Amino acid sequence: MTNRKKTHRAIALHYDGIQPPKVQAKAYQERAQALVEAVREQGGLIHQDEQLSQWLNHLNVGEEIPEQLYRVIAELIAYAWFLDGKQPPNYDGINTKV
C-alpha cells in the first residue's frame, strides 16, 4: 500500500466585470492555506470544488478561464456579488424565471 500525500491547492480568480475571469494566483500545500486566508481576509468568496480546481490548475497565472468554465464561474461570481449586495454592470433589475 502506498501512502500518497494529498496535494492541497488554491487558485484565485480575478474578474473586473468586463473581461473573462483570469487566474490571479496559484499555490500548493502550506502556501495554499495562506492564499485562502488572504482571500478570506479581503472578503473574497472561498469555494471548494475538487473537479473545478483540477480544471483551473491547468491554467497559468494571468490566463483567462476557458469558455467551457464560463457558466460555472459566472454562477459563482453572481453568488459572491449577491452576498455582497452588488449587481453586475448594466443589470436592469428584471427578475427572470428559469
Image (cartoon, rainbow, N blue to C red):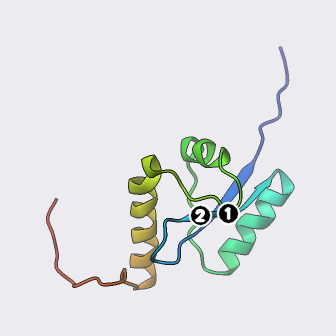
Task: Decide: few, some or many residues near mark 2? Use Cα within 10 Å; few <14, some 14-19, many ≥20.
Answer: many
- Between 27 and 84, the one nearer to me in the picture: 27
Q: Is residue 54 left or right of residue 95?
A: right
Give the residue furthest to the left.
97
Q: Which mark is residue 25?
A: none
Residue lying farthest to the top in this orientation: 1
- Horizontal arrangement in the rendering, residue 25 relative to residue 64 (left or right): right
Residue 17 position (above or below residue 68): below
What label sits on residue 22 in the rendered view?
2
Q: Position of residue 95 (x, y in %)?
A: 17, 75
Image point (78%, 41%), residue name:
7
- Residue at point 15%, 69% (across, down): 96
> In the image, residue 91 lies at what x, y percent?
28, 82
Residue corresponding to mark 1: 62
Q: In terms of image quadrants, where is residue 42?
A: bottom right
Q: In the rendered structure, which amino acid carries the disc numbered 1?
A: Gly
Residue for point 82% across, 28% down: 4
Q: Quadrant of the N terminus?
A: top right
- The image quarter containing residue 58 is top right
**Front residue of this view, candidates 20 and 84:** 20
Counting from the top left corner in percent of width and height, residue 13 is at 60, 65
Asked if the residue under mark 2 is in contact with the one under mark 1, i.e. CB atoms within 8 Å, the reply is yes
